Amino acid sequence: EQDIYKRGLKYERPSFTFQSELWEPQACARLSAEAKGYVYGSAGTRETHNKNIEAFKKWSIQPRRLVKTERFANLQTTVFPGETKETIASPMAIGPVGVLKLFHREGEAAVAKAAADCDVPYILSTASSSSIEETAKANGDGQRWYQLYWPSNEHDDITVSLLKRARQAGYTALFVTLDTYLLGWRPSDMDNGYNPFLKADQVGVAIGFSDPVFREHFRKEHGKEIEEDQSAAAAEWTKIIFPGLSHSFEDVKFLQKHWDGPVVLKGIQTVADAQRAVEIGVQGIVVSNHGGRQQDGGNSSLGILPYIVDAVGKDLTIFFDSGIRCGADIVKALALGADCVLIGRPYVYGLSLGGEEGVKHVINALTGELEMTLHLSGIPDVDKSVLNRSVLLKEDD
Ligand code: FNR
């Protein structure tokens, strides 16, 4: 921050805005109608999406004074219990977002590089436009986790192949998304007649097209190679990763058997499901409603967070997403009991505005504001002993 003001004395201005509320309109103004519709779009009338954003305004951070400290707040955090424990530099990770080449030609590689550079874990989506291995290479020594869109049981061989590739390429934790066994009712994509997974340039299928088991499956079903009929292959891959029907909690055991590391269930929105997650022995959950992109008419993700924390907060790691837009939002989610937040749309807007540099800007701005907000509130650490509900005031509705 001091550097920015010093450069300002020489009339140098930053390349990207620090006003986080401008990232979305600035990015949307540049993107094609299809790309804008895809990232900005939500399910139905955007009710769940809007509630996600508004929920943060119901809580206020209460600053304490004369808290003597010699340094800014400690952001280091540990996630996952027992042997699977990992230390992360701040309570923040890059959430899984598919088809990133839609937003910038360097797509996932740009984000994976930026994440490694800023020391933030990167979660790669199954619906990515770069392969598991290419993205790992771009991420280098960075921390990386893999998100699974879970094929139906008849395609367990494909699931096993994806998990094996991810482990071999250095992804340590598995995030299993439970709310997207088919894509939501998204009017903005429907108006554009646009499904990024079926489009001729097939940006969202790299992981499938590079998978030996999927390639063999396609060969058997269609009697030809993927390269000979890419549209048919894209349709086949899309049907496999969005099979239309869900799995059961029992099925999670299959993933636990084939994944040597922490398993996290993404998309939990009820206390009952959080309790089932504890029963089956996963290491974490993501309290998330997919940014309101899947089911409309739902509750805000932040609204349910404290109830889930009260029920299972001591038993597993609680990640949170859906609605994080600035550093103060992160403080509120952590105070309500999340261990770590996932950033979604904001970094996609950064990517759209400036590739790798744009993503770094968003991560650094969020981290900087998080640090500053904690410091100015007299909160010396992200540890639960000092960052908890006692720092929040619930504003009247
Ligand atoms: C997503 N999200 C998502 N989640 C996932 O598990 N796999 C995926 O491939 C995607 N793809 C995706 C694409 C786009 C364009 C968006 C905006 C989101 C959901 C994502 O991980 C996260 O849950 C939401 O982005 C959180 O909501 P906000 O904070 O971005 O509104």
Image (cartoon, rainbow, N blue to C red):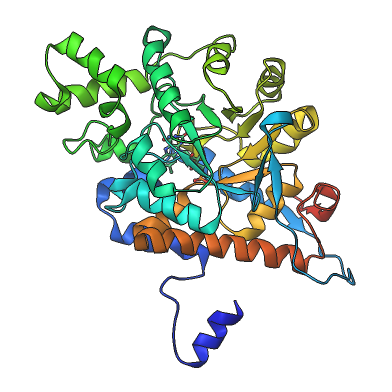
- Looking at the image, residue 237 sits to the left or right of residue 351; the answer is left
Residue in view at x 34 percent, y 45 percent: 100
Q: Is residue 323 above or below residue 220?
A: below
Q: Position of residue 246 (x, y in %)?
A: 47, 14
Q: Is residue 41 visible?
A: no
Q: Position of residue 59 (x, y in %)?
A: 73, 52
Residue in view at x 46 percent, y 54 percent: 347
Residue in view at x 25 percent, y 28 percent: 209
- Looking at the image, residue 133 sits to the left or right of residue 173; the answer is left
- Looking at the image, residue 165 sits to the left or right of residue 54; the answer is left
Quarter-wise, where is residue 156 in the image?
Answer: top left
Q: Position of residue 242 (x, y in %)?
A: 37, 22
Q: In terms of depth relative to the viewer, which is nearer, 219 or 35? A: 219
Q: Is residue 54 visible?
A: yes
Label count reads 0
Furthest residue toward left: 228
Quarter-wise, where is residue 320 in the image?
Answer: top right
Quarter-wise, where is residue 206 in the image?
Answer: top left
Image quarter where the N terminus lies is bottom right
Q: In terms of depth relative to the viewer, which is nearer, 162 or 242? A: 162
Q: Position of residue 281 (x, y in %)?
A: 68, 19
Residue in view at x 35 percent, y 57 percent: 352
Q: In terms of depth relative to the viewer, which is nearer, 290 or 252? A: 252
